[in-house]
Image (cartoon, helix red, strand yellow):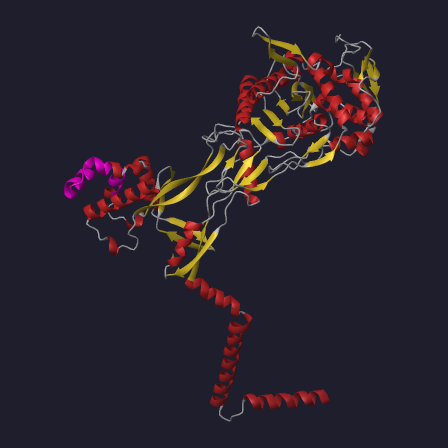
């Protein structure tokens, strides 16, 4: 009861407070006054305290504006300074159709019609030919371009949910013209129009009925290395390859300038004295690659010839310096066509993003691991039966039903599956997995390309015995061509795994080095002794094994073939008519300067050609031959000299480099 009494007294007092007068009109006026004071008080507090900064910025935006100026991108150069990608200044013409009263007149002026030019020539006493010459920058503009632009009337831009009408449309974009010629042509065209039409340009809201802006167009002078260099969008943004990678890391783009100025009622920004900043804009830095443009051309030329001959899904080739990890050339056929993208292949660097089962090119890595662990020597003898059972699977050797004995190096020379399975079994699952990972499989190399694939290498704990056996000769594992090149580099360079790279240095406009990219030796995989032995083993493949088509007179070349059947989902199994053909090797082998890996996926050839020795090896040989010739490498197999009579003579050198104590000199 007491609570009700207290509440009743409070209500009475509050009622007397809000109605202090006997006259109801005075009470109403009093209440409205209090309400308005509270509303205005809150609003002032909100504007000055709670949202003060917001409204200050709002006012600034109404009176001040910013123009963002993006400088041109830097150039991409090969290791010799040859330009692979460069920004070229171009001209884009625009018109304002909504401001043009006599459209036919302006159209005839731009098209340089004789009737209009003769009329103006006679009136102003200017030679007709001179007028045509001054208006020559418009020669690329067609009547169709003009009609298309005129129909648009204006450009519609949607911004923050609002539709803004921009009173100009593009007439012709990105023409390779000079600024001076374009400016002169526009001035003359407008002078002719206003003279013959009689219109007053000063009464027009936009007197520049015709005008131009300067832009930058990315050009690729030699049209090589498309999957490495990449491409930019029409707006100058990197889309693929190094164009994208370098842009994301601000290595190729200059500093964007923000120039502030006052705005007029229409929102146009006036820079005033700040306009002088334009001449100080910073161009993006140039980037020098490890790619050699001439070697890149050689690689692309060769694989395109074989691509058009065999029509595979694609051909990959990676040429690398094994002693630094620098990629000298990398290509994937069919190539992207810079001039006409619809006619060429994709920009996908398939050598880095498309893994595949490599086949027997993995065998030398298995042998090297066993040698490095001290389990065998190159001359360790293995008994290789014609049939060898692992689990529920029977594997056959390479000697057509004969039981044979092979030295360890002969297992690689003749590419014997039974022999390499036994080597892997000596090594064990865990150690084979460790070495495969050390050679870079199952993880990204870290090369400077977006979208690189790590390939597929399951953990050794998930391997069945049959899986373990097939892993020894390149099945149940997926690798990229680039991973193979990096692995073979470690195999022959003394056992050091170098991170593959495309970047050599960042340069300023004057060619001074701003940043240099040093070779990155990530880990030691093999001992130098084992690496040297493996160079001899790989050489035997070429001197008398599955890669004899790569044999040179003057050079020792080493490598390994790999032929793997491709899985066909339509038959739920491996298709004997579709293969991956690979040859991975190095040259000159006594002191390797180059590692080259060639992979051909699904060539369309007769059944008797479905072998890497007939598909990948010829490509490897053609590339290696041209590389050696271009680089003028000294032979390591023969020494040439001039005798006393002035004749050129030669003698064999490094004869002890090859093995000569094989148990199976002939395969049969």
In depth, the one of 55 and 179 nearer the eye is 179
In depth, the one of 324 and 214 nearer the eye is 324
- Does residue 77 sit above or below 649 in this rendering? below
User: What residue appears at the point 71 percent right and 13 percent down from the top-left corner?
Assistant: 655
Magenta span includes 244: no
Would residue 81 be seen by someone viewing this image from the given angle?
yes
Name the dominant secondary structure of the magenta segment. helix
Q: Quadrant of the N terminus?
A: bottom right
Q: How many marks?
A: 0
Q: Residue furthest bottom?
A: 22
Magenta span includes 114: yes
Q: Position of residue 647 (x, y in %)?
A: 57, 7
- Does residue 627 sit above or below 105 in this rendering? above
Would residue 1 be seen by someone viewing this image from the given angle?
no
Q: Position of residue 510 (x, y in %)?
A: 48, 41
In depth, the one of 238 and 611 nearer the eye is 238
In depth, the one of 13 and 433 nearer the eye is 433
Location of residue 383 (image quadrant): top right
User: Would you say 125 lies left or right of 555 here?
Assistant: left
Q: Position of residue 298 (x, y in %)?
A: 54, 23
User: Would you say 397 lies left or right of 213 here?
Assistant: right
In the rendered structure, which segment of residues is drawn in magenta? 106-132
Q: Residue furthest top?
A: 645
């Amino acid at each position: 009861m007491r609570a009700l009494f207290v509440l009743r007294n409070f209500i009475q007092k509050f009622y007397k407070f809000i109605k202090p007068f006997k006259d109801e009109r005075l009470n109403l006026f009093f209440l409205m006054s209090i309400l308005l004071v509270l509303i205005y008080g809150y609003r002032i507090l909100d504007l000055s305290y709670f949202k003060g900064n917001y409204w200050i910025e709002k006012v600034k935006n109404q009176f001040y504006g910013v123009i963002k100026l993006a400088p041109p991108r830097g150039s991409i150069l090969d290791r010799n300074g040859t330009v692979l990608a460069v920004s070229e200044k171009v001209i884009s013409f625009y018109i304002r159709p909504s401001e043009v009263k006599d459209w036919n007149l302006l159209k005839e002026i731009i098209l340089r019609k004789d009737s209009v030019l003769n009329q103006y020539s006679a009136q102003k006493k200017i030679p007709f030919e001179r007028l045509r010459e001054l208006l020559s920058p418009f020669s690329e503009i067609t009547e169709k371009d003009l009609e298309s632009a005129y129909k648009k009337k204006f450009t519609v831009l949607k911004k923050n949910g609002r539709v803004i009408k921009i009173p100009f449309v593009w007439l012709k974009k990105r023409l390779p013209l000079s600024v001076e010629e374009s400016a002169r042509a526009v001035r003359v065209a407008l002078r002719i129009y206003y003279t013959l039409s009689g219109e007053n340009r000063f009464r027009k809201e936009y007197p520049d009925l015709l005008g131009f802006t300067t832009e930058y167009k990315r050009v690729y002078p030699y049209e090589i290395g498309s999957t490495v260099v990449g491409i930019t969008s029409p707006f100058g943004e990197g889309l693929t390859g190094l164009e994208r990678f370098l842009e994301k890391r601000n290595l190729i783009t200059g500093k964007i300038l923000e120039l502030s100025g006052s705005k007029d009622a229409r929102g146009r920004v006036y820079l005033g004295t700040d306009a002088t900043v334009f001449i100080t804009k910073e161009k993006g830095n140039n980037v020098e690659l490890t790619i050699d443009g001439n070697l890149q051309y050689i690689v692309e030329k060769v694989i395109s010839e074989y691509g058009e001959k065999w029509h595979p899904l694609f051909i990959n080739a990676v040429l690398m310096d094994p002693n630094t990890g620098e990629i000298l050339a990398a290509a994937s056929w069919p190539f992207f066509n810079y001039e006409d993208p619809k006619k060429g292949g994709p920009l996908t660097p398939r050598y880095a993003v498309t893994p595949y089962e490599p086949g027997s090119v993995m065998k030398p890595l298995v042998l090297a691991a066993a040698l490095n662990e001290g389990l065998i020597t190159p001359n360790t003898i293995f008994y290789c039966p014609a049939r060898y059972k692992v689990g529920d699977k029977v594997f056959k050797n390479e000697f057509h039903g004969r039981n044979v004995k092979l030295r360890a190096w002969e297992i690689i020379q003749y590419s014997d599956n039974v022999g390499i399975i036994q080597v892997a079994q000596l090594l064990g699952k865990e150690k084979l997995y460790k070495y495969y990972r050390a050679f870079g499989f199952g993880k990204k190399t870290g090369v400077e390309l977006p979208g690189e694939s790590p390939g597929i290498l399951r953990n050794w704990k998930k391997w069945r015995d049959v899986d373990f056996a097939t892993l020894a000769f390149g099945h149940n594992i997926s690798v990229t061509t680039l991973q193979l090149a990096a692995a073979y580099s470690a195999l022959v360079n003394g056992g050091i795994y170098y991170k593959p790279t495309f970047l050599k240095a960042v340069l300023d406009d004057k060619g001074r080095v701003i940043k240099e990219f040093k070779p990155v030796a990530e880990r030691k995989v093999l001992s130098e002794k084992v690496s040297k032995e493996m160079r001899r083993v790989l050489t035997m493949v070429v001197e008398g094994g599955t890669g004899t088509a790569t044999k040179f007179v003057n050079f020792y070349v080493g490598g390994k073939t790999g032929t793997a059947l491709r899985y066909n989902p339509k038959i739920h199994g491996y298709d004997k008519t579709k293969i991956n053909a690979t040859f991975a090797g190095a040259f000159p082998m006594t002191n390797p300067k180059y590692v080259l890996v060639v992979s051909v996926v699904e060539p369309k050839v007769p059944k008797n050609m479905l072998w890497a020795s007939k598909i990948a090896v010829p490509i490897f040989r053609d590339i290696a031959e041209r590389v050696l010739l271009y680089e003028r490498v000294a032979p390591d197999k023969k020494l040439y000299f001039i005798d006393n009579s002035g004749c050129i003579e030669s003698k064999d050198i490094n004869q002890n480099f090859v093995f000569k104590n094989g148990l199976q000199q002939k395969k049969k």
